[in-house]
Amino acid sequence: MAPETKHLEVTLDTHVESVNLAEEMCVRVAEAAGFNEDECYRIGMSVREGVINAFHYGNQEKPEKKIHLAIELTGERMVIHVMDEGKGFRLNDVPDPLAEENLLSTSGRGIFLMKAFMDEFDVLPGRTGGAELVMAKRLPLLGSTSNNGNGNTASSDAAPHQEA
Amino acid sequence: MPSLFATTREFSGIAIVDLSGRISLGDGSALLRKTVRDLLDEGRTKIILNLGDVNYIDSSGIGELVSGFTAVRNRGGELKLLNLTKKVNDLLQLTKLFTVFEVHNDESAAVRSFT
């Protein structure tokens, strides 16, 4: 019998404190799911970057807009969705922060870090009208091939409805 | 409680800023920005950021380090990093910023590198 999927969903205000709150929540879920300290750090950082993206770029720091965070724990993976109420964006349009001309940019590294730290990452058109970031990490017992934070295995089955 | 603390000392005309805590979106990044700007306003353009007690940096913090580096360089000075923790070191490697910043593990060597 397949393990039950656990689902947690919260709506966050467009506020700096929401970034810390989302990170703390996801790290606690990750700890409970059995991820080690390094993996919890990477998951926490990725969620943090996702919510910063929603806060700053998606909702443009407008307090009347909301950030929607959802966490799913399946038998195999922890999947995190971060949705904003902005205009959305295409992953292919995000500049490469490692390009020589972008190295001294003061922003634009959040997406890169999420892709590096998670096993799967994608950006979808969100049901709230903005962008939906979807990121996933394989659970420890089944995740022996999980990357160590230096690789990038973006996309795949975390995002079955990709249009970007 | 503030997420970042900064204390500045001076040695041979070089400002050494001891940072501890998190350089992240919000007050951490803001304090780093203010600290560097204040030093520049005082005409101090030789700066070492001691990150030995900084255990966390997010993309906002990375951006603030880059911003400080550029601001100091635009005034004809130099901003160097000292005592990176493993997490910060790994982040700078991952983002290729190791090729931008001059990084030292020894304070005396960092001070001497300005002469």
Image (cartoon, helix red, strand yellow):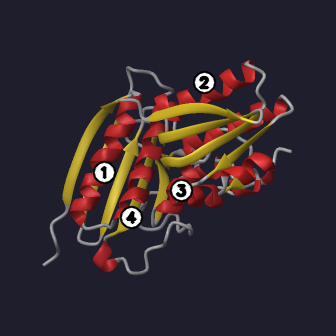
Q: Is residue A39 above or below residue B44?
A: below
Q: Label 1 belongs to which residue?
A: A26
Q: Chain of mark 2?
A: B
The amino acid type found where label 4 is placed reads Glu
Q: Are marks 2 and 3 in contact (CB under 8 Å)?
A: no
Q: Label 2 belongs to which residue?
A: B34
Whether residue A96 sits left or right of residue B34 in the image: it is: right
Mark 3 closeness class: few <14, some 14–19, many ≥20 residues within 10 Å: some
Same chain for the residues at labels 4 and 1, yes or no?
Answer: yes
Mark 1 closeness class: few <14, some 14–19, many ≥20 residues within 10 Å: many
Which residue is situated farthest in the front direction here? B12
Q: Chain of mark 1?
A: A
- Earlier in the chain: of badge 2 and badge 3, it is 2
The amino acid type found where label 1 is placed reads Cys
Q: Are marks 4 and 1 in contact (CB under 8 Å)?
A: no
Q: CA distance from mark 1 to mark 2?
A: 31 Å
Q: Nearer the viewer, residue B79 or A49?
A: B79
Q: Position of residue A51 (x, y in %)?
A: 42, 40
Viewer can see residue A50: yes
- Which disc is residue A163 wearing? none
